[in-house]
Image (cartoon, grey):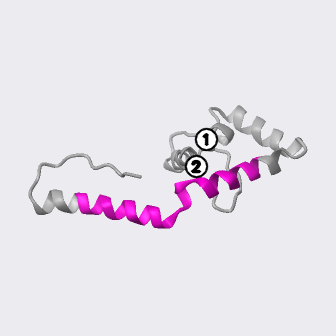
Amino acid sequence: LYAGLPVITRPGQTFASRVAASLLTALGAVNHTCVRSEEDFSALAIALSKRDGALEALRGKVETLGRDSLLFKQEHWVASWDRLLCQLWELRAFNLTPRPVVATR
């Protein structure tokens, strides 16, 4: 995805398939390449290979989404991770009741 290469996935029982769907969701491309069945997976792959310009158009869409997404902005990710760790440290350091911590944008 970082290189602009479209990824087709079908979320299922495996961790990897759910991670791929999660990344596509974060990127904003889930509606383009996340399918519900093996038949849909095959149909999309065949359509992208047969329709002139379809794969190139999708690649361009993924590249554009990647440039505009926080998914690949390392500085943002590091800052969010740091805030999460600080929240967790405060809970532990001050003997506070455990609670969910949420990443912020």
Q: Residue at the location (37% across, 51% down)? A: 104
Image coords of residue 92 (percent x, y):
15, 60
**Quarter of the rendering occupied by the N terminus:** bottom right
Q: Which residues, given as a range, are shown in magenta?
A: 58-87
The residue at which mark 1 appears reads as 30
Image coords of residue 8 (percent x, y):
68, 45
Please, which residue is most extreme toward the left here?
95
Q: Are marks 1 and 2 in contact (CB under 8 Å)?
A: yes
The residue at which mark 2 appears reads as 27
Count neighbours of disc 1 (C-alpha within 10 A) and say few if under 14, some if 14 to 19, many if 20 or more. some
Main SS type for the magenta part? helix
Q: Is residue 84 left or right of residue 49?
A: left
- Amino acid identity at mark 1: Val
Q: Viewer-proximal residue, 7 or 16?
A: 7
Q: Circle 2 sits in a helix, a strand or a loop, which is it?
A: helix
Taking the magenta stretch, the answer to whether it contains residue 68 is yes
Q: Mark number for residue 7?
A: none
Q: Is residue 104 left or right of residue 51?
A: left
Image coords of residue 10 (percent x, y):
61, 40
Taking the magenta stretch, the answer to whether it contains residue 18 is no
